[in-house]
Amino acid sequence: MAKSKILEVGGDADYMALTFEEFSKGRKASVFIDDTDKTIKEFNQWSEEEGDEWYKDTLYIKVHEVDLSLETIRWLKGNVMDYDDMKHSNIYHENETV
């Protein structure tokens, strides 16, 4: 199996993953994987514009290369990962819509 890229999103503030999903506006994770520094800069600007300044400078993004398919990531989210924890930090497969 070819390596897949996984986007890990979290931060110091509560509900960072949900806030990131709102920011992403339904774009694929690969958009954010390609340039994480640009993504963080755009997120900080967006959070200021939205009046959510407490989220500014709290986001972290990590990219991991793993041997996991999109179907496996979906299974992990539905069967292993805790829903409440996923509001704060989450993972997204490169071919997954955030």
Image: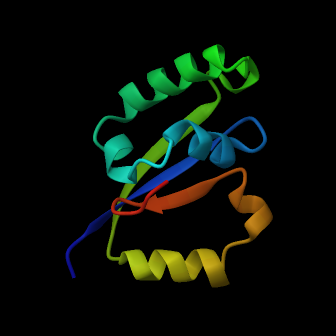
Residue 17 location in percent, x, y?
64, 48
Question: Which color mode does the image show?
Answer: rainbow
Quadrant housing residue 66 = bottom left
Is residue 44 left or right of 95 when viewed as pictured? Answer: right
Q: Residue at x 60, y 74 (%)?
A: 77
Residue 76 location in percent, x, y?
57, 79
Q: In this rendered view, identify the residue nearer to me: 5 or 48.
A: 48
Q: Residue at x 41, y 47 (%)?
A: 27
* Residue 15 to residue 70: above or below: above
Q: Residue at x 50, y 42 (%)?
A: 25
User: What quarter of the picture does the N terminus occupy?
Assistant: bottom left
Residue 62 location in percent, x, y?
45, 46
Q: Residue furthest left?
A: 2
* Residue 87 to residue 43: above or below: below
Quadrant housing residue 75 = bottom right
Q: Residue at x 39, y 75 (%)?
A: 70
Q: In this rendered view, identify the residue nearer to me: 38 or 46.
A: 46
Is residue 18 left or right of 8 when viewed as pictured? Answer: right
Is residue 55 left or right of 73 when viewed as pictured? Answer: right
Count of numbered circles in the view: 0
* Residue 93 to residue 7: above or below: below
* Residue 13 to residue 92: above or below: above
Residue 98 location in percent, x, y?
49, 54
Q: Residue furthest front?
A: 25
Is residue 33 left or right of 74 when viewed as pictured? Answer: left
